[in-house]
Amino acid sequence: MDGKVKLDLYRTMIRIRLFEQESRRLFKERLMSSRVIGYTGQEAVAVGVSAHLTLNDQIGSSHRPLGHLIAKGCHIGKLFAELCAKRTGFNKGKAGIYHLFDPESGSMGANGIVGGSVPMTSGYALAHQLRGDNGVSVSYFGEGASNQGGVQETLNLAACWKLPMVFVCENSSPEVQIMLGHEIDLPQLSIENVSERASGYGMPGSTHQGWDVEEVYKAAGEAVKLARNGGGPTLLEFKVHNIGATPEGTIDPVEGKKQYCPISNYKVKLKGEGILTDELDNQIIEEEKTLIAEASDYAVRSLPTETLEAFTDVFTEDD
Ligand SMILES: Cc1ncc(C[n+]2csc(CCOP(=O)(O)OP(=O)(O)O)c2C)c(N)n1
């Protein structure tokens, strides 16, 4: 991996982290109406995967979509605006966090229905296959979502039809299974690794440390290449530690989870390799802070969505 790629991975992880920090500030100050479903601690997954995607490729996302969209290259100001219910948002401020949709960057649907975007994402892959344009789609979902019938059916269909897609399961329960901030006492999975399901459908599958961005980058690179070359889908599982999963909670890594913070890990690694100096690190952070501040300002200054907009875009309009 060359140094530029490494620095890009590092920078994008910081952008996602800062976006979330700023979102929490806006939420607390009642400038953002949408909840903030956190991605802090998981940044390495979206960043390592999207580094292999182009604007011709699509992603389908979950109820935890912020990192996915930012890594896919969405307009940051429009993302803030959408969450602030402003008319300049991707979806005129009507989607909130759960139904973000930005065709321009290929971000084809966050989804409030757990596992809901997975079957949709196979449709994007089928479109690429029929057109023969070498495009791929990536489907993000959690380990809880992996149990949805639609997810399992999509795995089967994608394997049978050799669809050009990559399934990315972000398994946030390596230590404890948490649902919306509440511990649940019954297990959601009868197996340790979700990727074990892959062989049952006849596709490759593997499990990786989702807090190591280079490991994600490598695994995703192979899976995307396979899909682009007509080799069909792969099920990748990344173990992750969400740091601050509650909507209003802190985003500072709690003591016991610090070793799983993908950004601090990578900072140390890149400095050790001499790719990142203190000066460059400060420069990257300052540039990203400026970008986020300007984007946030754009959203705050934008006009709110008009109430009557609730009645538009509901049904397809005839010409
Ligand atoms: C079909 C459906 N069932 C239940 C819910 C409520 N719900 C919201 S998030 C969530 C947990 C999802 O767990 P997982 O897929 O592992 O994602 P994580 O939150 O761990 O990232 C549940 C059950 C929902 N939104 N949709």
Image: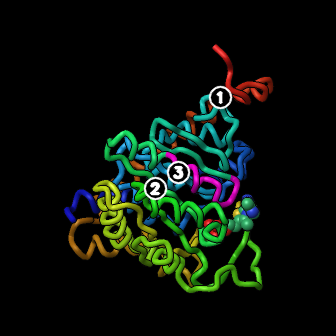
Between marks 2 and 1, how big is the CA–CA gap? 28 Å
Q: Which residues are magenta?
A: 112-123
- Relative to 153, is 301 above or below? above
SS at mark 1? loop
Percent coordinates x, y for residue 277 in the rendering: 26, 65
- Relative to 9, is 33 above or below? above
The residue identified by callout 2 is 138
State whether label 1 is within 8 Å of ligand 1.
no
Q: Is residue 68 left or right of residue 87?
A: left
Question: In this view of the protein, which residue sits in the foreground, 168 or 269?
Answer: 168
Local packing at callout 3 (Cα closer than 10 Å; few below 14, some 14-19, many 20+) is many
User: What's the amino acid at mark 3?
Assistant: Thr
Q: Is residue 256 left or right of residue 148?
A: left
* Label 3 close to label 2 by CB (< 8 Å): yes
Local packing at callout 2 (Cα closer than 10 Å; few below 14, some 14-19, many 20+) is many
Q: Earlier in the sequence, mark 2 or mark 1?
A: 1
The residue identified by callout 3 is 121
The residue identified by callout 1 is 87
Question: In this view of the protein, which residue sits in the foreground, 54 or 124?
Answer: 124
Between marks 1 and 3, how big is the CA–CA gap? 27 Å
